[in-house]
Image (cartoon, rainbow, N blue to C red):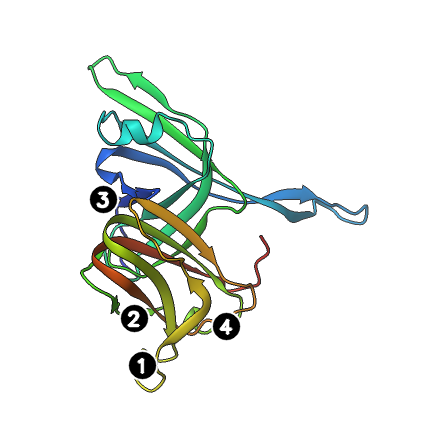
Amino acid sequence: MAPKSTGLGMGLEVNGVSVAGDVNSIGKIGGGPMPIEMTGIDKLGYERFGGLRDGALEWVSYFNPTLSHPLFAALPTADIIATVRYPGGTIGTVGAGVVAKQIGYDPKRGNDGSLLVDIKTMSNGSGVEFGLMATAGLRTDGAAGNGAGLDFGAVIGTTAFGLQMYVQLTAFTGTSVTVKLQHSNDDAAGDPYADITGATTVALTTAPQAVRIATAGNVSVKRWVRVVSVGTFSNAVYTVLVCKNPVAVVF
């Protein structure tokens, strides 16, 4: 049996800001297609098809007037981009990403004097996406470079349905950095790494910021994937979540 895991040591980045130290607990990560009842009169039970995808990310934050409060209290009308990193802190750790609208900022004072804030977000444009971290937690690059390979394993292997990548740039010094993905059949043992079509950010020049990049739905992605940074900079701190589609996906 594979080892089980606790919820200790998780990470959470929102719009390029690492807020995990201000988070008391995560209440919900999930969603899925809304069921549409399409039951024929010849059936003996309900018949359902998948409808619009939905998702939500909810957490409870401590009140921090210098970090989490100014980030969330403004209740931004623009989308936020969030990445949750599950325990492990290594390449291949499970993660989840979402582009969402923040719909709440509700402080609550406890009888013990504590001040906690309920924060809720709802996905916008696509649901919550689960994938694997292609960086070992927060990766720090002092110059352009290649990361270690992420093995999606024989179960997923090579697919032809594209992928989505979430990049959270938490700190940056320099002119610009571009983050992209490359792939290989065997971690470059015989098949050299090459760029994945469409899996690249624009040149990022400031931090904090976050982006979600989606390739075309018919892009082939090999078993091994690695993160590559290019540009002119002396410090870039970021995470990359890769959501590889094992089947055709429509957004």
What residue is disc 4 on? 220
Q: Is residue 75 above or below residue 194?
A: above
Q: Does residue 189 appear to the left or right of 40 in the view shown?
A: left
Is label 2 in contact with label 3 (beta carbons under 8 Å)? no
Q: Quadrant of residue 132?
A: bottom left
Seen from the viewer's position, the closer of residues 203 and 20 is 203
Seen from the viewer's position, the closer of residues 21 and 7 is 21
Spatial CA distance of label 1 from label 2 is: 9 Å
Res 149 label: 2
Mark 2 Cα-neighbour bin, 10 Å: few <14, some 14–19, many ≥20: many
Residue type marked 3 = Leu
What residue is disc 1 on? 188
Earlier sequence position, callout 4 versus callout 2: 2
Query: Which of the two discs, 3 and 1, sits closer to the camera?
Result: 1
Q: Measured from the top left, where is residue 16 in percent x and y? A: 31, 44
What residue is disc 3 on? 8
Spatial CA distance of label 2 from label 3 is: 25 Å
Q: Residue at x 28, y 59 (%)?
A: 135
Residue type marked 1 = Ala
Q: Measured from the top left, where is residue 189 in percent x and y? A: 30, 84
Residue type marked 2 = Gly
Res 84 label: none
Q: Quadrant of residue 241?
A: bottom left
Residue type marked 4 = Ser
Q: Residue at x 35, y 53 (%)?
A: 167
Mark 1 Cα-neighbour bin, 10 Å: few <14, some 14–19, many ≥20: few
Q: Does residue 208 appear to the left or right of 158 in the view shown?
A: left
Earlier sequence position, callout 2 versus callout 3: 3
Query: Which of the two discs, 3 and 4, sits closer to the camera?
Result: 4
Spatial CA distance of label 4 from label 1 is: 17 Å
Seen from the viewer's position, the closer of residues 117 and 198 is 198
Q: Residue at x 31, y 78 (%)?
A: 187
